[in-house]
Image (spheres, grey):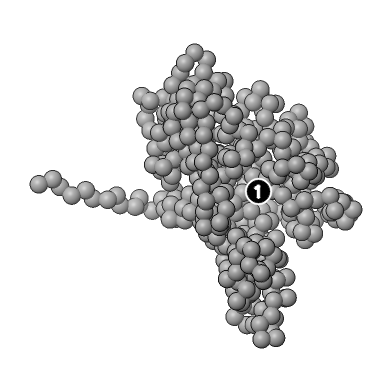
C-alpha cells in the first residue's frame, strides 16, 4: 500500500477543495435521497453534479451511468478527507448505491446492469433489502419466504422484517426460497422485486429512537418475473453474501466515523459545565483521544481493505472485523458526545434545550441497533473466531434425553 502523494494527487486535492468552496451551498444533508418535494429535487441535482465531476460513482463504468475513472486508493482517501473536513454531504448513498450496485456489477446480467445501476446511483430509484425474517435473522439461510413457479413468473408468499426504508422504496433486493427440494443454502435465489406489486404490504416498526426506520413486509401471492433473478436460481446464498460484504463496509465507513469524531470534538469545545469546557475535562478528553486512535486505526484498515480490492486479493480475517469494530466505535463516539453535554445529554426530540435537534441521542440509539443489525456483535465474533482464526465451532445446545 503506497500512500505517497504525487503531484497529480496534490492537484486533485486542490480541485476537490475548490469545488467544495464554490458549491457547498448546493449540498444537502442527505444520504438516501428519499425526501419529498423540493428537498428531494435538490438531492438529485447535487448527486448529478457529483457524478459529473467524478466525486460520486467515480469508478462505476460510464455505460452504467457512472464517471468511469480507474480505481485509485489515494483519490478515494482525498475525497473522504476533503468532504469530511468541509462537512459536506457525499450525496446519495445507502442500500442501493452502496450494496446492490456493486453486487450487480459482479453478478448481474448486462440487461440488469443497464436497467438498474444508472437510476440507482442517481437517486431516482430507492432500494430496500429483504433478508431477515421473524425466524431467520442471524441464521439467514433459514429464510422461509417462498416463490413458486407459474409460467414465466414466480408467485411469492411470506414475510420479511427489519426492512430499512421499505416504506419509501421503489424496489427490493430479496433472498427468496425458490428450490424447495434443495439443501438449506442451495435453495435460495436473489430476486429484484418492485415494491408497488399487488400483494405487498408494508408495516412500520417504531424503534427506541422514536422513529420508524424499519418495517415488516408481507407478501401475499406477489407475482414477479423469473427474469428478475440475479445470477442463477439457487445461487442466492453466494450473491447475498456479496451484498453483505458491502453492507458491513458501509456500516463501518471510516469516513463517516471521522466525520462523527470531528463533530464530537467541536461539540466538546463549546459545551461547558461549571464554566469548564468539556474538552478541558481530563476524563472526557482522554476518551476523545482513545476514540481518535481507534478511528485512525479504522481509516488505515479501510485503506488496507481497498488495496486488497484493487489487487483482487482476499483480505482474510481483516474483512471480518470491520463491521464489529466500526459499529462499536460509532456508538462510543455518540456516547461521548452525550456525556459532554452534561444534563442536556438526557434531553430528546422536542425538549426546550435539546442540542442539534437531538441528533446525537438518535445517533446513540440507532448505532446501538446497528451493533445488532447486519449480523449481531456476538455472531460477528463467532465468525471471526471460526472462519478467520480457525477456532472450534461454538458448542451446540445439548438436548435432554427422552425418558
Left or right position of 112 against 207: right
Percent x, y of residue 312: 62, 41
Residue placed under numbered mark 1 in the picture: 306
Residue extending furthest toward the bottom: 274
Q: Nearer the viewer, residue 233 or 266?
A: 266
Left or right position of 400 against 212: left
Judging from the image, what secondary structure is the residue with disc 1 in? Answer: helix
| Total labels drawn | 1
Left or right position of 343 against 142: right
Residue extending furthest toward the top: 151
106 up-or-down from 216: above or below = above
229 up-or-down from 18: above or below = above
Label 1: how many Cα within 10 Å (few below 14, some 14–19, many 20+)? some
Residue 341: in sight, yes or no? yes
Residue at 62% x, 56% y: name it: 301
Q: Nearer the viewer, residue 8 or 244?
A: 244
Left or right position of 363 against 240: right
Percent x, y of residue 262: 71, 66
Amino acid at each position: 500500500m503506497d500512500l505517497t502523494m504525487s503531484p497529480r494527487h496534490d492537484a486533485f486535492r486542490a480541485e476537490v477543495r475548490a469545488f467544495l468552496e464554490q458549491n457547498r451551498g448546493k449540498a444537502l444533508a442527505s444520504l438516501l435521497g428519499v425526501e419529498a418535494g423540493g428537498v428531494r429535487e435538490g438531492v438529485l441535482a447535487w448527486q448529478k453534479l457529483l457524478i459529473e465531476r467524478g466525486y460520486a460513482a467515480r469508478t462505476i463504468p460510464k455505460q452504467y451511468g457512472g464517471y468511469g475513472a480507474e480505481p485509485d486508493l489515494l483519490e478515494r482517501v482525498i475525497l473522504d478527507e476533503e468532504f469530511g473536513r468541509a462537512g459536506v454531504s457525499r450525496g446519495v448513498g445507502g442500500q442501493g448505491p452502496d450494496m446492490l450496485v456493486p453486487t450487480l456489477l459482479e453478478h448481474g446480467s448486462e440487461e440488469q446492469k443497464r436497467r438498474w445501476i444508472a437510476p440507482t446511483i442517481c437517486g431516482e430509484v430507492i432500494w430496500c433489502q429483504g433478508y431477515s425474517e421473524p425466524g431467520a435473522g442471524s441464521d439467514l439461510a433459514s429464510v422461509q419466504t417462498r416463490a413458486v413457479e407459474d409460467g414465466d413468473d414466480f408467485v411469492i408468499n411470506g414475510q420479511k422484517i427489519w426492512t430499512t426504508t421499505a416504506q419509501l422504496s421503489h424496489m427490493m433486493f430479496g433472498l427468496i426460497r425458490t428450490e424447495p427440494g434443495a439443501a438449506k443454502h442451495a435453495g435460495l435465489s436473489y430476486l429484484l422485486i418492485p415494491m408497488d406489486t399487488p400483494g405487498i404490504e408494508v408495516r412500520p416498526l417504531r424503534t427506541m429512537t422514536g422513529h420508524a426506520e424499519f418495517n415488516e413486509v408481507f407478501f401475499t401471492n406477489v407475482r414477479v418475473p423469473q427474469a428478475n433473478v440475479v445470477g442463477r436460481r439457487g445461487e442466492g446464498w453466494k450473491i447475498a453474501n456479496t451484498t453483505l460484504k458491502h453492507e458491513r463496509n458501509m456500516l463501518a465507513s471510516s469516513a463517516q466515523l471521522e466525520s462523527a469524531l470531528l463533530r464530537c470534538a467541536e461539540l466538546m469545545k463549546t459545551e461547558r459545565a461549571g464554566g469548564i469546557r468539556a474538552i478541558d475535562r481530563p476524563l472526557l478528553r482522554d476518551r476523545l483521544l482513545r476514540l481518535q486512535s481507534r478511528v485512525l486505526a479504522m481509516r488505515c484498515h479501510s485503506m488496507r481493505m481497498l488495496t486488497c480490492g484493487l489487487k483482487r486479493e482476499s483480505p482474510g480475517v481483516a474483512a471480518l472485523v470491520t463491521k464489529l469494530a466500526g459499529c462499536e466505535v460509532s456508538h462510543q463516539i455518540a456516547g461521548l458526545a452525550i456525556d459532554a453535554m452534561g444534563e442536556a445529554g438526557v434531553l430528546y426530540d422536542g425538549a426546550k434545550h435539546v442540542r442539534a435537534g437531538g441528533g446525537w441521542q438518535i445517533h446513540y440509539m440507532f448505532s446501538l441497533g446497528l451493533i445488532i443489525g447486519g449480523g449481531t456483535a456476538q455472531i460477528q465474533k463467532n465468525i471471526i473466531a471460526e472462519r478467520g482464526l480457525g477456532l472450534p465451532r461454538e458448542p451446540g445446545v445439548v438436548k435432554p434425553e427422552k425418558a
